Image (cartoon, coloured by chain):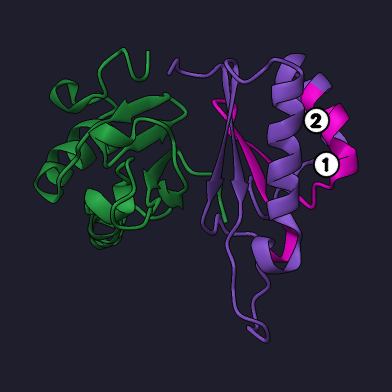
Chain colours: A purple, B green
């Protein structure tokens, strides 16, 4: 397995119903997002360049799903499946983060 | 939450007993390693500088537990709790990866 050019971490933390803290997996649809991102990268032949990994909690649960890209260390908030084309084309391929989707600086700054 | 200087990802993937592929969580003791690393960083007052996140499978299951450090993109193989002092002091604080613990290049190169 080659070291990827970019590594995308998608939070799929789950918490039980009624838990006072929301979670990306239980409340913000991150499992679907993770699956859709993986399929889209596969279809575009990008799986050797971009690795996708699910994670436990990364912190800003109220703004999930949390998606983090390294080596840049860029965190996204509330990414939806409809955001994936821009995310993939502009950031993962083009190298320029999608400014409108970034996690606010107070949560990752 | 500040963006960390270093972000450590510890694979805690689990697979059922008898599964042909080993997993860091079920076969390589990564839950204990994750907990010990987190406690050690807390005791050293490093939690603002180093973030630790658990993950699903990162790939080289047969050499687990897999531990990945960004932004460097340095992957470790088979890290044990007894390796944590060197890992923390030399790499997470000192910035120099511990060469003897690195994932072989064929699995992350």
Picture coordinates of residue B59, whole percent (x, y): 41, 32
Tag 1 subunit = A
Along the horizontal axis of the image, is B42 left or right of A7?
left
Where A89 falls versus B16 (above or below)?
above
Label 2: few (<14), some (14–19) or many (≥20) C-alpha neighbours in 10 Å: many
- For residue A41: magenta? no
Q: State the image quarter where residue B58 is shown.
A: top left
Q: Which mark is residue A87?
A: 2
Residue at image position (25%, 18%) is B104
Residue drawn at point x = 22 percent, y = 41 percent: B88
What segment carries the magenta color?
Answer: A61-88
Local secondary structure at mark 2: helix
Would residue B55 be found to the left or right of residue A25 on screen? left
Residue A76 visible from this viewpoint: no
Split into 4 quadrants, where in the image is the N terminus of chain A? Answer: top left
Q: Which residue is mark 1?
A: A101
Q: What is the x, y in percent for residue A96?
A: 77, 20
Which sits in the foreground, B2 or A2?
Answer: A2
Q: Quadrant location of the C terminus of chain A? A: top right
């Amino acid at each position: 397995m080659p070291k990827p050019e970019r590594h995308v971490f998608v939070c799929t933390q789950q918490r039980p119903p009624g838990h006072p803290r929301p979670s990306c997996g239980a409340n913000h649809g991150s499992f679907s997002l993770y699956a859709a991102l993986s399929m889209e990268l596969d279809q575009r032949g990008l799986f050797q360049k971009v690795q996708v990994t699910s994670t436990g909690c990364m912190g800003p649960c109220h703004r999930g799903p949390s998606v983090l890209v390294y080596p840049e260390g860029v965190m996204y908030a509330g990414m939806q499946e409809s955001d994936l084309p821009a995310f993939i084309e502009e950031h993962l391929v083009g190298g320029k983060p999608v400014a409108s989707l970034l996690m606010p600086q107070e949560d990752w700054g």
